[in-house]
Image (cartoon, rainbow, N blue to C red):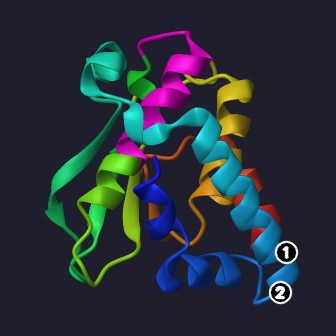
């Protein structure tokens, strides 16, 4: 883990935290400290394939073998392919996939594209607890990593949400 800390405090990383908090130094500093604390406790860099292979059996999340037109990695998420009920395992697998995608970003890239394919998704596919924890981890511990999110086959239930947002 000690090797990861300099990367988390690099100029590029600090800049991502500042952008995530609209250049408010106090808020960005607090966010970065919380991320460092989380990384020291959760130890995402120690998660190995053997730890999460059972979560990956259906291909619910994977890094695509292609890049978008801007050279960014593409992380494909298919919530309809959920195969376990372990919220801890699902989150661990998500963190593994995020770490893997970040590790494999080109030297000039900080962000990635998420393609979320809702084919086969039902209200019972993903728990609210996992959804909340996923949002928390992505927003607070991986700020400014999402360049573009594409929802493919979104369920009709999302329509009202989009109308409220737009």
Please state if 36 lies on the left or on the right of 61 as rendered: right
Which residue is drawn at the image coordinates 81% and 85% (left, top)? 25
Q: Secondary structure at mark 1?
A: helix
Outermost residue, bottom side = 23
Q: Is residue 5 left or right of residue 120?
A: right
Report if residue 122 lies within the magenta region. no
Badge 2 crowding class, 10 Å Cα cut-off, few under 14, some 14 to 19, many 20 or more, is: few
Residue 77 visible in the shown view: no
What span is in magenta? 83-98
Q: Give the residue pinned by disc 2.
A: 24
Give the x, y percent position of residue 80. Answer: 43, 27
Q: Residues within 10 Å of mark 1 (few under 14, many from 20)?
A: some
Q: Residue at x 35, y 59 (%)?
A: 102
Residue 101 relative to residue 67: left or right: right
Residue at which label 1 appears: 27
Depth check: 144 or 57 in front?
Answer: 144
Quick one: SS at disc 2? loop
- Report if residue 124 is visible in the image: yes
Q: Is residue 25 above or below residue 81?
A: below
Residue at the location (65% across, 75% down)? 17
Q: Position of residue 8 (x, y in %)?
A: 52, 66
Task: Tell me if label 1 and label 2 are in contact, CB under 8 Å.
Answer: yes
Does 96 lie within the magenta span? yes
């Amino acid at each position: 883990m000690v090797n990861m800390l300099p990367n988390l405090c690099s100029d590029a990383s600090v800049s991502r935290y500042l952008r995530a908090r609209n250049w408010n130094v106090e808020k960005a500093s607090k966010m970065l400290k919380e991320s460092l604390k989380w990384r020291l406790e959760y130890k995402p860099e120690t998660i190995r394939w053997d730890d999460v292979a059972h979560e990956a059996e259906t291909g619910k999340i994977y890094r695509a073998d292609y890049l978008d037109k801007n050279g960014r990695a593409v992380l494909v998420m298919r919530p309809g392919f959920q195969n376990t009920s372990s919220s801890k395992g699902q989150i661990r697998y998500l963190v593994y996939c995020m770490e893997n995608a970040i590790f494999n970003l080109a030297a000039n890239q900080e962000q990635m594209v998420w393609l979320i394919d809702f084919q086969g998704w039902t209200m019972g596919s993903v728990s609210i607890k996992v959804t909340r924890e996923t949002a928390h981890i992505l927003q607070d511990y991986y700020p400014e990593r999402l360049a573009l999110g594409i929802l493919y086959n979104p369920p009709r239930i999302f329509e009202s949400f989009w109308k409220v947002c737009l």
